[in-house]
Amino acid sequence: MIRCKRLRVSRLLSRAGWAVLAVNAVACSEWSAEPAVTEPAALREGAAEPAANILLISIDTLRADHLHAYGYDRRTSPAIDRMAQEGVRFADVVAASSWTLPGHATMLTGLDPASHGVVAFRGDSSLPGEVEMLAERFAAAGFRTAAFAGGGWVSSRQGFDRGFERFRSAEQTFRFSGRLKRAVRNAWNWISRHRNERFFFFLHTYQVHMPYKPPRPYDRMFDRGLTGPKRRSLPFGALSTWARDGVKNRAVAAQIRKLYDGEIRFVDLWIGKLLGWLRSSGLDRRTCVLLTSDHGEAFGEHGDFFHDRAKLFQEVTSVPLLVWCPGRLEGGRVVESPVGVVDVAPTALELAGLPVPDDLDGVSLVSQLRGDVVPPGRVLLSDVDLSVERPLLSNHDPEPGFVLGLRRGSYKLIYRSTDGSRQLYDLASDPSESENLVLLRPDVLADFEAPLAAAIERRRSLPEASVARPEAANPGFIEELRALGYVE
Ligand SMILES: [Zn+2]
């Protein structure tokens, strides 16, 4: 068993100190399967519980079922697996959308897309001023706040910088390659500078997002043969085409998955380093880490690749959520009942000892972290606007409309506004969503009608998505989106 020596990290923050820190961090990141060094204690109720700092990590495009902790056969995630062993894993987490902007807007507000209103796939979409961001709530309570984000759809353009005294995103600080390493080191640098204060830190990375180009040795970790095109010599457009064509070719699709898995393993390495540094410094005793994602990724399960189709199948809506608070939470607990990314913000607030506003769509999951079982019946929403299917720079006007996903228990209803179509699946018996039960289970369908009607009404109250394209005037933004595959 590797025990991480507690370092006086604040003394090691000079550039010269990084080497020493890195050596220890690597040792700490090689987490063994044994329990935590310290005795875990159940999260206690009441004001006597010292409030926690919050580190929220969003690994963009991370589908839950590609993590070993979520049952994946490949060992993509040893550090995240250990997070699950020492913390609480939510087994069934519903993403708010199938793409980045509304997904993160929900994650960082606790509001459904129909409440925060950021649903349209357009360059000038931004969070309305009256929507209070999670960081603003932390800042108002006296927390130090900072974020390192990947840019693109998670940048100051959309208002994600609100409430952060320091907000850096990829377009400001680092280029596409090497961004994760720098982001994690910058995150730790900031956290350790503020280790004696209360803080909220948000770390977002596109590392597992297309293009799947993990650095060596992760590019061959799960695909030693690498029989496809030499990716390093491919321009992004060619990679994108190859990847999309892979849907029609099982062997290529399988190889693409291996590259995606290599990206996950690389991210996991840096998650392990960051958690190891927290542990080494003793900050793990005063910090809760929440790890989640905004949406998953399709690999041809329902005929699509990537996540830019207006569909809400599990490959894009099932994401991980782990909460790691050593010393505060009993380790190894798994919460099976469905929860949503919409619950992340209220949960973070309560863990930090702050009040949870009662006008949020999400709810705090702290009682479930303690082991309480919530009564069934809650309906969780996902939402994708049809404008997501419009190429960003094309002159093609999308059909106005939206797709909604409603989860209740094991059942999932998918509704498309343009034709009123409904698909009903029982994820317990049909996790791949292959058998539409609309005609077979009218009783279940009937139970969904009232919440569906309410969700449709709320969604229709939003302004029509504009087809204006102000993004054309911003070449920097276009380049970022091209790097992410949204622009050919
Ligand atoms: Zn995303």
Image (cartoon, rainbow, N blue to C red):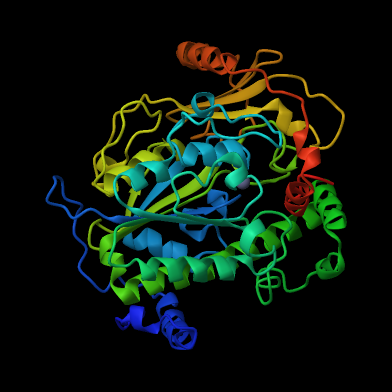
Question: Which quarter of the figure has residue 85?
Answer: bottom left
User: Does residue 42 show up?
Assistant: yes
Q: Where's residue 23, x and y in %? A: 46, 86
Q: Nearer the viewer, residue 251 or 382?
A: 382
Q: For the N terminus, give its image quadrant.
A: bottom left
Q: Where's residue 72, x and y in %? A: 54, 57
Question: Which quarter of the figure has residue 326?
Answer: bottom left
Identify the residue shown where x is 72% and y is 28%.
Answer: 387
Image side of residue 271 versus residue 415, left or right:
left
Q: Nearer the viewer, residue 127 or 22?
A: 127
Q: Nearer the viewer, residue 363 or 443?
A: 363
Identify the residue shown where x is 82% and y is 24%.
Answer: 397
Image side of residue 361 versus residue 319, left or right:
left
Q: Where's residue 226, x and y in %? A: 79, 70
Q: Where's residue 117, x and y in %? A: 55, 26
Q: Note whether 465 is above or below 236 in the view shown.
A: above
Identify the residue shown where x is 36% and y is 41%.
Answer: 137
